[in-house]
Amino acid sequence: MFFDIFVSAFLLVADLSQARVMLREGRFAEALREMEAVMRKAPANPEIRYQVGELLREQAADRAARLEELAPDSAEAHELLGRSLEARGNLDEALAAYQAAISRNPRLPGVHFLIGNIQWKKRDIEAAKPEMEAELRLNPRHALANLRLGQILLTMDQPAPAADHLREVVGVDDSSIEAHRALGKAYRALGKTADALREFQIVAARRPQDDSVHFQLAGVYRSLGQVERAKAEMQTHRRLLQEKAEAARKISPSGGR
């Protein structure tokens, strides 16, 4: 069995090598399709995910460098520079690059989201909110902008408009676990317990090891008067937390002492 796993991983890495060649030849669309196919075959393989990430970072950096040679002060050049910086974890520099891009072209699609998303990562939701709203004025069906704005509105205790944006997300991309989770929270805050239950059950079915969703389910079942189910969900929540803590102790430097 180990040999089969090793051969499978080797073949996937070979497929990524083909994608790298395609990128070097300028066949970007084909390369992206190849990488997507590899990710579908091994969605949980950390080595494959790492190598795909490296390829995407190389592509972003290469495109940014080429565009900077041709039009160094264009909005597109600043956007690509920002993407490259963000991929390397340089959030402040990436934010400055995105802001330079939007100052040159305020209607450049996607860039208001990129600015707001960095601000979301930095926990500056007051600054992130108008950027998400600006993106949605340009593209009302931008799934990630709707998700982020929904999450922002939830933190601002505005569950009704949050639910509107989150329903838009699941309507476009039903696979978004975070959208279902946030929508469940919005419904719960609105007193729509049955709807909240449905959303949390979707999350739990797709991510059963997520301790937080079992905590939410326990609260919903209590609201519905289903005491035994609430107890069972709390037990699952506590068990998963304990397993998480034990796993953290095992990998910590002092875990084996």
Image (cartoon, rainbow, N blue to C red):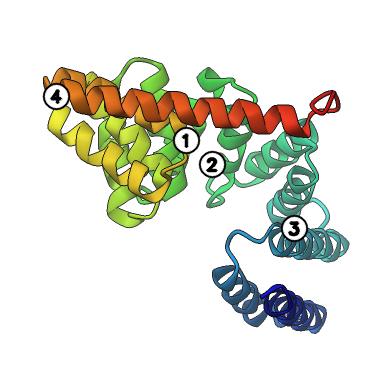
- Residue 106 sits above or below residue 15 on the image: above
The quadrant in which the N terminus is found is bottom right
Whether residue 236 is visible here, answered yes or no, is: yes
**Mark 3 to mark 1: distance in Å?**
29 Å
Q: Which badge, 3 or 4, comes first in the chain's sequence?
A: 3
Mark sitting on residue 226: 4
Q: For the C terminus, give its image quadrant.
A: top right
Check residue 113 in the rendering and tell me which mark sits there, or answer none. Answer: 2
Residue type marked 2? Phe
Task: Give the left or right position of residue 64, taking residue 48 as reference.
Answer: right
Q: Nearer the viewer, residue 44 or 73?
A: 44
CA separation in Å, label 2 and label 1: 6 Å
**The quarter of the displayed image where residue 164 is located:** top left
The residue that appears at 65% across and 39% down in the rendered structure is 103
- For the residues bearing labels 3 and 4, Cβ distance under 8 angstroms: no
Q: Secondary structure at mark 1?
A: helix
Which mark, residue 37?
A: none
Query: Dots 1 and 4: beta carbons under 8 Å?
Result: no
Kind of residue sitting beneath label 1: Met
Instruction: Name the disc covering residue 132, or none.
Output: 1
Q: How far apart are the alpha carbons under marks 3 and 2?
A: 24 Å
Task: Say whether disc 3 or disc 1 marks the residue closer to the N-terminus.
Answer: 3
Asked whether residue 160 is in view, the answer is no
Quick one: SS at disc 3? helix
Position of residue 157 measured from the top left corner of the image (x, y, whole percent): 34, 15
Task: Name the mark on residue 50.
Answer: 3
Place of residue 86 in the rendered image (x, y in percent of width and height, measured from the top left)? 74, 43
